[in-house]
Amino acid sequence: MTSLKSSIGAIILVGIFSLPIVSCKKTEEPQPTSINLNYLHGGLTKSWRMAEYYVNGVNFSIPAWAADNVLVFNKDNTGMWIFGVVDKEPTDTIKCDFFDWSFSLDSLTIIGHNSSPDNRIRKAVVILNEHIWVEEFKAVSGDVYRYVYVDVVLQNPGAGTNNKRLTNGLTKIWKIRELLYNGQPQHLPEWRKEDYLLFNNDGTGWFTLGEDAEFPNDTTNNDHFFWWFSANETRLELEEFSQNSFEIADCNIITLSDTLMIVEEQVMINGAMTLVRVTRVPAVK
């Protein structure tokens, strides 16, 4: 069987926070203010990264495994935590945690689908000076944790037409709708339907593996990649860091619009060169 990582070229076509205390610094508490929901999700999808971390109002260092996690909000009241390429533990199998969010008064409630009960519900109490403050109360210890998130990318008014189609001018998530090998439709298992491509307007992105793994106890991580257009924007190229080796997807663009992406590439599968064509549609509308 071709593993998920060994066939990453074809598929490209195709924690939770309990952080260790390292160092500390007292900080002022933010004052709650109204939340601009369009600013939260950017009109479609927006991704955020952790910039600061507090316990009971005291600032602590962010470990590497938490620093490369990404928090994503969608305008349809869904979202996900994308856990990065650095694991908290070598046996860590968590890849994404999908969640639902709702807004009431001056607070966001974030409810994770598969988080442990102690980590399932979090509160974003304030957006202050382009930051999100996500707060959670640990019932066992009685501690209050706050995580400060900042933009991963900013709006790019100068982005070209295809960039805007691919990223919605900021960030856009694409999901797979159809997979063809040499023109023959392939079965899409449930775990592959959650394999999303997230494109940012700055030429970066994430290949996310969803909450369902291909194999039990799969420790494969999500992949952070760089992307660019070539050959007069008739090709889409991706370079990712995967399992300590660089891999490149070099795809012919068949169709790229606001609502449809069709790309194809010759890929070695089970010892034979195979024309892989993947159709993707936006995951959020």
Image (cartoon, rainbow, N blue to C red):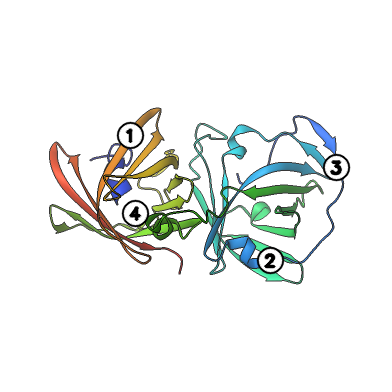
Please say if the residues under marks 3 and 2 sit with CB atoms less than 8 Å apart: no
Q: Nearer the viewer, residue 188 or 284?
A: 284
Mark 3 sits on what residue?
A: 27
Question: Which residue is pictured at 37% across the width and 44% down the height?
Answer: 228
Going by the numbered disc 2, the residue's amino acid type is Asn
Q: Earlier in the sequence, mark 4 or mark 3?
A: 3
Residue 230 x, y percent position in the rendering: 30, 44
Secondary structure type for disc 2: loop
Mark 4 sits on what residue?
A: 192
Between circles 1 and 2, the one closer to the viewer is 2
Cα–Cα span, label 4 and label 2: 34 Å
Going by the numbered disc 1, the residue's amino acid type is Glu
Between circles 4 and 3, the one closer to the viewer is 3
* Extreme residue toward the front, this view: 158
Mark identifier at residue 247: 1
Q: Is residue 180 above or below residue 89?
A: below
Category of crowding for the residue at label 2, using alpha-carbon neighbours closer than 10 angstroms: few (below 14), some (14–19), many (at least 20): few
Q: Earlier in the sequence, mark 4 or mark 2?
A: 2
Residue 263 x, y percent position in the rendering: 26, 53
Number of numbered discs on residues: 4
Which image quadrant: the N terminus?
top left
Residue 194 x, y percent position in the rendering: 40, 56
| Image quarter of residue 40 | bottom right
Q: Nearer the viewer, residue 210 or 59?
A: 59
Going by the numbered disc 3, the residue's amino acid type is Thr
Between circles 4 and 2, the one closer to the viewer is 2
Cα–Cα span, label 4 and label 1: 20 Å
Cα–Cα span, label 3 and label 2: 24 Å
